[in-house]
Amino acid sequence: MIRPLPFPNAKRLMSIYHSYTKYNLPKVTVSPSAYGYFRDHGTSFEQVAAFSGYTAPQNLTGSGEPERVHTVKATANFFSTLGTQPMLGRTFNAEEDAPGTGRAAVLSYGLWNRRFGGDRGILGREITLDSKNYAVVGIMPKGFEFPEEAELWVPMGFTSEQLATSGVEYLNVIAALRPDVTYQHAEAEMAQLTREFLARDNDAANESGWSANAKPMREASVSDVRSALWILLGAVGCVLLIACANVANLLLARAAARQKEISIRSALGASPWRLARQLLTEGVLLGIFGGSLGLLFGYLGLDLLLNTIPIKVPSYIRVEIDPMVLAFTFALAIVTGLVFSAIPALQLSRDNVNEVMKEGGRSSAATGRNLARTAIVIAQLAMAMILLVSAGLLIKSFVRLQQSNLGFNAQNVLLFRTDLPPSKYQEPAQIAAFYDQVLERESHIPGVTSAAITSETPLTSDMSSIFSIEGKTFQLAPHAHVATINSSYFATMQIPVLSGRAFTDADRAGGDPVALIDELAARAFFGAEDPVGEKLMFNFEGTAKQRVWRTIVGVVGSVKHTDPLGAETKGEVFLPFAQRPERAMIVALRTSGNPMAIANSARREVLNVDPLQPIQDINSMEEVVNDFIAQPRFNMILLGTFAGLALALSAIGVYGVMTYTVMQRTHEFGIRMALGASPLDVLRFVLGHALRISIIGLTAGLIGALIVSRALTSMLFGITANDPATFTGVALLLAAIAIIASYVPARRATKVDPVVALRYQ
């Protein structure tokens, strides 16, 4: 969150994006017309560049087996806006970015090394992408893969018609500030440009709360995970404070045990400074050894952490042992040992040597030390309460998420994606014929019980499209997920048909346009009415003069698509593949056993249909489900680990303070027992003291947890941030741990010999 992005122009880079406040869409991609307007009319920026909002896989053929590579279309000034130069050759120029001429390509270091063996002679040679030839003009330096997963860049090549298109938003836009312009000035100018753009030709967009915004690129890069990072950083801080409190308690206890030794040294002529220096040296050594061990775990654990993070960290965001953070944490370890050694050193220097030399004697500072230690334990318990409540909420939320109904059967389903090149598959009939042959071959693989195709699988998409319903008006236009499927899709995914019918082989090109909607869309847009027989229309189908009205022929069960922590997903509309063939489709195969066992056979059957057509993203549906819940599971495990550490450290803290208390009050316990108190009375007394400390700490922690848990609201599923069962359970757990940790020193107090305890001080 704090390190500059690894681009020469990092401090001047801004991201430009659209927002729709009435649709609760705070950050979406930019339309070509808006990009052109901001580029031509903005005065705050030196350069404004655009690139495709996703890395589009393309078929790279020649020089070996066909391979799918992630290609990004970008404007000619894309690299200069970032300030990044190629390692070899050049980037494409304005002439190559003109429409119809964009046959230049820039390769990533990884693709150049993997596919072409690092051959410098590749410059000027042609490669084939989706049956089109591109001349390689440059190689980017190692580590440059912007945007995420990019392997190859080609010119955008906007036409004048595309730059006039405002209804389709698919561009990521970045801009480099002029040296004399601030972020605030650029943001204010974007607000003005939004008003001008709306007034020019896009007033309809204002009905949805449309606006354009500019934010520093670094801020935009971490905006989606900022809250989670702050929560985890807070958890680390709590564990650190609890550990520091334990260091303080243990050093105080150690110093108390050495009172007589220190007094003897003082009586033999050691100066207060010499004694303090000894304790401080021991504390610094403790910090050095502890810090060194921590750094070792840090280095060993970094790769493990990165491998378990459920999101792919973009290559342009480095995650490593940072020298400044390294120096800070190591210094913190040493300072912790130094500071908490200084406290007992100061207190021991004030003790009366004669009093301490008496057997069982107590110095005048003992009471002050007890109060300080008690306050430290109260703070430990409060922080542990906050962490345990947070972890408990996430654990309970994750259990609810796992138990939730996803709307389909994920077991024994194999998925893989194919993306047909438009140069080879131009006509809908060609596309349909390819997938018909693939499904025919795949369905005959031994172990395959059903085969289907879909443009979107459950759990993988958050995109939606706006549509109209015949005879109905809405304050906000209806929007839902859209998936193109074939007639066997619902049987393959085991999604129930609730009313009407599913698609059949009769729903072909040239027939009556039809659609299916899911239960959520039916409830949202038709209420208690039966939607079967009603008609809907998408703006992306047909022409402006003649739109395609589709008849709803059935309602199916809803499946989850979006954020796993969202209580409800958007509704979904299904279109028949035969009436709207798409080149990029996902093949779903239901099997009788392990789906990955037939992966090679599935790949082979596609190559039998087209030897130059690779497949990608081959995976099981169960792995997709695991990826879907990976982020909440990771948050739960990480915060649960911190909470477990906090619980253990707090138990040690309670044990330490009670041990110290028993040691300091040995004389008092001797008097009580000499006057008739039983061991059980002493046991109750010590445990009662521990319980009072625990109640104060838990009360403070409860207040803190009620405040902190509100920040977890977006990370919870199926429970509230102030779930009573979680708060009660954690409080009882902590109280029980505190009592258990106090039992050993309490038992020790009952073993005090009154004769020994009553010796003169």
Image (spheres, grey):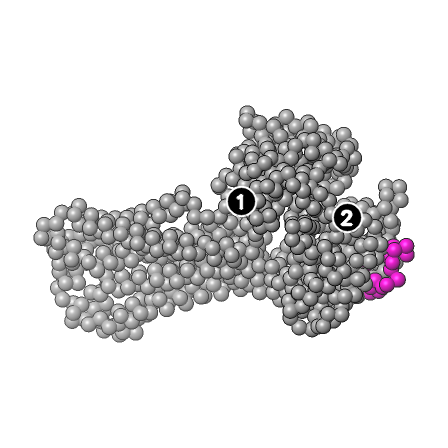
Relative vertical location of residue 197 with respect to residue 375 in this rendering, above or below: above
247 falls in the magenta region: no
Residue 509: x and y in percent read 88, 55
Q: Is residue 111 visible?
A: no
Residue 694: x and y in percent read 39, 61
Magenta stretch, residue numbers: 499-516
Residue 178 lies in what quarter of the image? Answer: top right
Neighbor class of circle 2 (other Cα within 10 Å; few <14, some 14-19, many 20+) is: few
Viewer-closest of 689 and 125: 125
Magenta span: predominant SS is loop
**Which label was assigned to residue 143?**
1
SS state under label 1: loop
513 falls in the magenta region: yes
Neighbor class of circle 1 (other Cα within 10 Å; few <14, some 14-19, many 20+) is: few
Q: For the residues marked 1 and 2, what is the alpha-carbon distance in whole angstroms?
A: 31 Å
Residue at the spot 50% in from the left edge and 60% down from the top edge: 637
Relative vertical location of residue 496 with respect to residue 72 in this rendering, above or below: below
Viewer-closest of 556 and 252: 556
Q: Amino acid at mark 1?
A: Gly
Direction from residue 666 to residue 233 in the image, left or right: right
Residue 456: x and y in percent read 72, 56
Residue at the spot 80% in from the left edge and 61% down from the top edge: 436
Q: Amino acid at mark 2?
A: Pro
